[in-house]
Amino acid sequence: MSRIPDIWERYPRVVVANSLITAHVLTSKRVDSSGEPISSMDLRDLLEPEMLESRGLSGSAAGSWGRVGSVHPSVLKARNRLAREMLGAYLRPTRRLDLIRLGSAYGGWWIPGDSAKAGAVAYCAGAGEDITFDLALLDVGCLVTTFDPTPRAIAHVEENAPPTRRFRFEPVGWWDEETDLKFYGPRDPRHVSHSALNLQCTTEYFTATVKPVHKLQTELGDDHVDIIKMDIEGAEYRVLDSLLTFGPLPSVLCVEFDQPQPLRKTIRAVRALQLAGYTLANIDRWNYTFTRLVDEKVVVHH
């Protein structure tokens, strides 16, 4: 198994300090299946899914972060915090000076201020029970289409979406081909998001139609898309590959890299977008904003 080159060695001292705190949290708990505490030397193993199975942490997960199984919640929380810090230090977003945040504290996203304008076409996948970002785009004059096949999300959109021709809702999921998929529920029944990849390793599901974005664009009659936001519970990697192959390639691309997933998978996705001309403009927890605008306004790193 190949690791991400130098990522463990290159992140700055503040993250080293954080890893020591994480090590203290982990070593104070008996969290693996044998009842033995995990040592700080195993911290980097938490970032690679294959190592979880050998430590007995993945349960029935077959060594995949995409199927968490019985990983202790404290381990996941510590791992995700450390992974966030490492990725931010390693990927070094440019942090454009003109970014604005639209939407609620939970459902909001950072985008360039001049991209949210009248006539811009926005596709927002993953409504859940918070469409404040979608509605903020609508308020500035964008043509917004929201996508989500989840029953609770459908009910939320129907209750909260305004009656305007500039807002459309499609109860369909995003994928890299047209088919029907099972969407598995969250462990906490209070949560709404379902995953076609069964990120939380549950058994309850519903079945829904999924389509690639370029097919949806054709069906909707849009000749271009300016803004794409996706929070699609692990399906983002297949959808990003499809976007890079078939389009559309928006000026602003907002992606939540849902966890847990291997870090190298996220890094490869970011690098592929950069090779396609995108700049990583901002990281807000697991929400990544990419831009491919001509007049990039960036902070230069020294």
Image: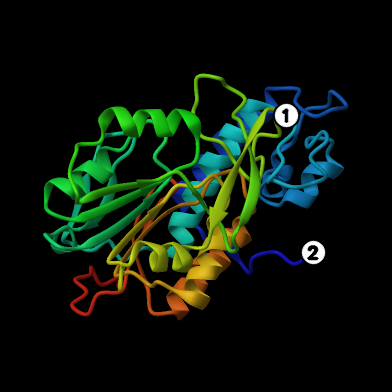
Residue 40, horizontal then vertical, whole percent: 69, 39
List the residue tagged with mark 1. Answer: 203
Tell me: 250 left or right of 211. Answer: left
Q: Quadrant of residue 288?
A: bottom left
Residue appearing at x 50%, y 58% in the figure? 11
Residue appearing at x 48%, y 70% in the figure? 243
Q: Quadrant of residue 255?
A: bottom left
Depth order, front residue of 120/65 = 120
Tell me: 243 left or right of 162. Answer: right
Q: Are marks 1 and 2 in contact (CB under 8 Å)?
A: no
Which mark sits nearer the N-terminus, 1 or 2?
Answer: 2
Identify residue type, mark 2: Met
The image quadrant where one finds the N terminus is bottom right
Residue 242, horizontal then vertical, whole percent: 54, 69
Tell me: 81 left or right of 103. Answer: right
Depth order, front residue of 138/112 = 138
- Mark 1 or 2, which is nearer the eye? 1
Residue 188, horizontal then vertical, whole percent: 57, 21
Distance between mark 1 and mark 2 Cα atoms: 30 Å
Residue appearing at x 84%, y 23% in the figure? 35
Q: Is residue 282 above or below residue 244?
A: above
List the residue tagged with mark 2. Answer: 1
